[in-house]
Image (spheres, helix red, strand yellow):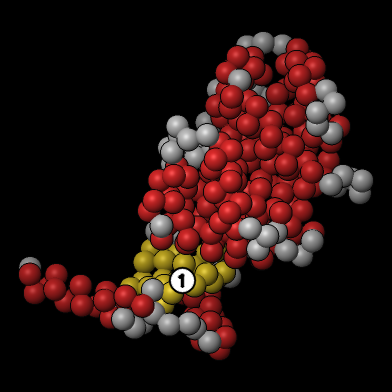
Amino acid sequence: MTLHAASREALDLAESRLAEVLGDAGTDPSAVGEELLAVVGLLSREVGLRRAVGDASSDPEARRRLVRAVLANKVSEPTLTVLDAVVGARWSNPRELVDGVESLGRSALLTSAERAGELETVEDQLFRISRIVEGEPELERALSDQGAPVEAKRSLVRNLVGDKVTPVTRILAEQVIERSRGRNVGDGLEELVELAAERRSRSVAHVTSATELTEEQRERLTEKLNRIYGRPIALHVELDPSIGAGLVVRVGDEVIDGSVAGQLAALRRRLAS
């Protein structure tokens, strides 16, 4: 998510308010997160409302009253309190305000998973969904199709994950697909994996292996990557027999290709040069 300076400041203020709201023992972080993402859907559909609440030249109190009038009896008071902070701040443009609300909704849902002891599970499930989507070009196209009905895409996700994932994973995955805005859905899912890993103070290593790694091999690889990058690494492994043997490891934009296929490709390039 790219934000201009004013929007970054507005999001910082809203995140502080969200933390205060979620710190209340009576607040359900999952409910707040789901409601904030529902507001994202509303603002995405209603252009006039989006422009009105994102108009930095208008009276902040008037923007708060408008949001409360529209959402009265539709979302909880904790969610309205967060939205008070959002619409009362000065955003660079309405689109970035909506992006900010989406970020807050994701944060609340990940907080819910963290408190339930399911954050690592959610991270792993999102990674596996991203691998399935990227491995099926037709599914990727269907989920990324901006002209397709949202409910049809939501059904595709539910058919894909069934009851095999946590509610937080399903909600987050559906949100990425509903708001893909022409982006690659697999990339959007990977962004969520990174967000979940960051909450665990880890960076993500995407590992491709020809065979299943043993627990001992995973531990050794994790320790080695921790030393290389100087920070904790969360390992996500994908099987791909076509690489022959060895591993391909991607951390951020850096790729370490130790596979047989990668070595052969490098040799061909050297011979051709």
Q: Tell which of 177 and 150 is nearer to you.
A: 150
Q: Is residue 248 visible?
A: yes
Q: Tell which of 164 and 103 is nearer to you.
A: 164
Q: Tell which of 143 and 122 is nearer to you.
A: 143
Q: Position of residue 247 (x, y in %)?
A: 38, 78
Q: Is residue 187 visible?
A: no
Left or right: residue 30 compared with residue 182: right
Q: Position of residue 54 (x, y in %)?
A: 62, 20
Q: How many marks?
A: 1
Compared to residue 179, the image places residue 26 above or below, namely below
Residue at the spot 73% in from the left edge and 43% down from the top edge: 33
**Neighbour tally class for label 1: few under 14, some 14-19, many 20 plus, Cα within 10 Å:** some
Amino acid type, mark 1: Glu
Compared to residue 131, the image places residue 61 above or below, namely above
Residue designated by label 1: 238
Left or right: residue 14 compared with residue 271: right
Residue at the spot 55% in from the left edge and 40% down from the top edge: 152
Quarter of the image where the C terminus is located: bottom left
